[in-house]
Amino acid sequence: MKRLALLTMTVVTAACQSQPGPATVARVQRLYDEGLNGAASGAAAVMMRDESPEADVAAWYGGLAEIRRGNEAASRTFFERAALSSNPDVAGGAEAMLGQLAEGRADDDAALRHYGKAWTLLDGSDQRRVAQRAEAIAARRNMSNTQAMWAQRLKPGSTAAPADGAFALQAGAYSTRASATAHARRLTTQTVRAGLGPATVRQRGTGSGSLWLVQCGSYGSRAAASAAKRKLPSVEFVVARQQP
């Protein structure tokens, strides 16, 4: 998969007919690579309709194909399906693209929500590009706290919410990153709306390996974390001490 290679949303036009064939991810990718965007989109739609095991990956390519065709509504439908993937790269890439589409229609709040989800799923340069776009939105909207949060995330070595306090709100601990990432993705919409920021995944080493923690926020005292916890009573948070 071309991981976020299309974050600049470059539009490429192509008008070709394709030969019929079975709807598989390999075929969807080949059609997309050949510029047969209508055929790629159609094959991806078939896989989604049939609930094929790799429908999420096909939906990613379907979304990219529809961007090339200039069909924003159709691309959003594909990316919304891809965002449900258990693969962090697929889901994170889809969330990032949904963020860009939201920016394009001047829905900055939706863009920030999608970028928050994408940031919990991606890593490396992809994660950094998401943070840069989110910080730019916050700066344009004069959202000083949000801008500061994203600026902190852009600092070298930052892979989680800024650790400016000893405590965080924890919603779960998992033995695999994929499980923790899926929970963080589901939770982020609620935490952002409650003013707690996006849920993030933090790794903690144990004697037998690693645990992946779903947390949000960073607070200087247990009392401050407990007060923040009351903003979202529907979620069973515990106040957890952060590792240095």
Image: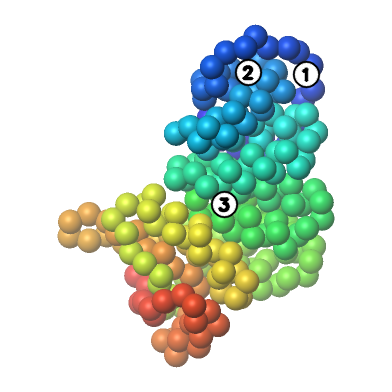
Q: Residue at x 66, y 69 (%)?
A: 146
- Residue at the spot of label 3: 118
| Residue at the farthest top position | 19
- Res 170 quadrant in image: bottom left
Residue displayed at 62% across by 55% down: 115
Mark 3 and mark 1 in contact? Answer it, CB < 8 Å: no
Query: Mark 2 or mark 1, which is nearer the start of the sequence?
Result: 1
Q: Secondary structure at mark 2?
A: helix
Residue 54 falls left or right of residue 4: left
- Eyeballing the image, is 186 above or below 221? above
Nearest the viewer among 84 and 166 is: 84
Residue behind mark 1: 14
Q: Is residue 218 visible?
A: no
Q: Position of residue 1 (x, y in %)?
A: 53, 30
Residue that label 2 marks: 31
229 or 55: nearer the eye? Answer: 55
Marks counted in the figure total: 3
Which of pointers 3 and 2 lies earlier in the amino acid sequence? Answer: 2
For label 1, the SS is: loop
Q: Quadrant of the C terminus?
A: bottom left
Please, what is the three-letter code of the amino acid marked with disc 3? Ala
Percent position of residue 151, x then y: 62, 62
Mark sitting earlier along the chain (3/1): 1
Residue 237 at x, y percent in the picture:
42, 76
> In the image, is residue 23 above or below residue 67?
above
Q: Nearer the viewer, residue 155 or 75?
A: 75
Identify the amino acid type marked 1.
Ala
Q: Amino acid at mark 2?
A: Leu
- Judging depth in this view, the residue of 33 and 83 nearest the camera is 83
Judge depth for marks 3 and 2 and give the one in front. 2
Q: Are marks 3 and 2 in contact (CB under 8 Å)?
A: no
